[in-house]
Amino acid sequence: MPQLQVQLVSTRPGRVGERFAHWFVGEACRHGGFEVELVDHAEVALPFFDEPRHPKLGGYAHQHTRDWSATVSRADAFVFVAPEYNHGYSAVLKNAIDFLHHEWADKPVGFVSYGGVAAGTRMVQALKPVLVGLRMVPVVESVNIPFQEQFHGPDGTVAANQVMTDAAAAMLDELLRLTTRLRP
Amino acid sequence: MPQLQVQLVSTRPGRVGERFAHWFVGEACRHGGFEVELVDHAEVALPFFDEPRHPKLGGYAHQHTRDWSATVSRADAFVFVAPEYNHGYSAVLKNAIDFLHHEWADKPVGFVSYGGVAAGTRMVQALKPVLVGLRMVPVVESVNIPFQEQFHGPDGTVAANQVMTDAAAAMLDELLRLTTRLRP
C-alpha cells in the first residue's frame, strides 16, 4: 500500500491542529487505501532554513536536514493539517517545505485547513504556486473547516459533521487515484 | 524625521541579502527623508511563533515578542530586503510578521527583492494579501533585482545600475509621501 503522510503543521502552544490531525488520521485509516503515518512538526523541530546550498543540489550539511529528507522521501502522498495565519501560510510549513526539493516532486498533496470564516482556504490558495513550483500535485478535493471551535468534541476529539467526513473521503479517494498514477 | 526600518530578512549562511540591505541603507540615507534603521533578522533571532494568544490581543507572554513589538512600533515605514523561496515568501519573514499585529498597521511598506528571472516579484505578490490583512500599505514602487549575482561588487558591495538606483529613489519618495499622509 502507498504511504500517506499526515503532517501536523502547527507547533504553537495551545494548537488546535492536533485534534484535527488525529481525527483525519482516523478517517484515513478507515479509508483503507493507504498506510498512514502521522508526522508532528513539533517533533520534527527544524530550525529556520540553514543549509548553505540550494536544496535542489542535495548534499545536505546538517543531520536535521538529512533526517527530514528521509521522512519526506518515504511518503507517496501528503495531507497538511495546517492553519491560516494572516491570510497566508505559516512559517513552520513553508520552512519545512523549503528545506527540501526533489523529495516532494510527483507526489499528490491535500489539506485539512481550519480557521474562521475562510476555513483556511486563503492559506491553501496561497500555497498552491509553491507546491506546483516543486512539482507536487495539489488535489482539488479539500477539507476546509470554518469556525473550527464548533467541531470540538470532548477530551481533544473532533465532533465532525457529514460535510467533513464526506470531504475527507473524497480527498482520500483522489489522493489514492493520483498516487497510483504518479508512482514510478 | 520619520523612521524607516530596513529589514534584512535572510538569515541563512551565505545570504546575499546582507549586501543589498547595506546598499539600500546607503540609498535611503542619501535620499534624506528618513531616519534610517537597519534591522537584521539574524540578530532579532525570533523562534517559531510561540505566543499562546492571538497577537491582536496583545499581552505577549515572551520577552522576545515584547522586544520585537518595541522594534516594529518605533518605525513609521518599512522596506523588506527579502529573498523569494519556491515562488513564495520565506519562513523568517512570515514568522516575524505573524508575531505581531497592531504594530504593523497604517504603515507603508516596500521591497528590495532579489532572485533569478522573476527578481523576487512572486514573493512580493504573494505577500501583499498578508500585508493588507494587517492594514499595512504596500507601495507599488519596488526594487526588484533579477539574477542578483550580476550586481555583486568587490568585498560584499553592490554594483548597482541606474535602474536600481532610480527604483530605490522612487520607492523612497512614495514611502515618504505615504508616511506623511498616514501618520496620526
Image (tube, coloured by chain):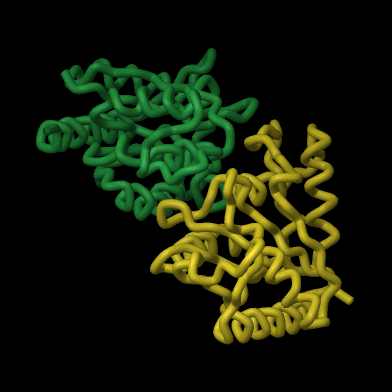
Chain colours: A yellow, B green
State the residue lying farthest toward the top: B155
Relative to B22, say whether A124 is above or below: below
Instruction: Judge from the rendering whether residue B130 lies leftward or rightward of residue A163; answer left or right.
Output: left
Quarter of the picture containing the N terminus of chain A is bottom right
Q: Is residue B150 visible?
A: no
Q: Where, by quadrant of the figure, is residue B141 drawn?
A: top left
Q: Where, by quadrant of the figure, is residue B100 drawn?
A: top left
Relative to B168, say whether A151 is above or below: below
Relative to A116, say whether A31 is above or below: below
Q: Residue at x 57, y 82 (%)?
A: A161
Relative to B76, say whether B48 is above or below: below
Q: Residue at x 76, y 80 (%)?
A: A176
Find residue B56 and report its horizontal and vertical position in percent.
36, 44
Q: Nearer the viewer, residue A48 or A160?
A: A160
Q: Nearer the viewer, residue B68 or B79?
A: B68
Q: Residue at x 53, y 58 (%)?
A: A83
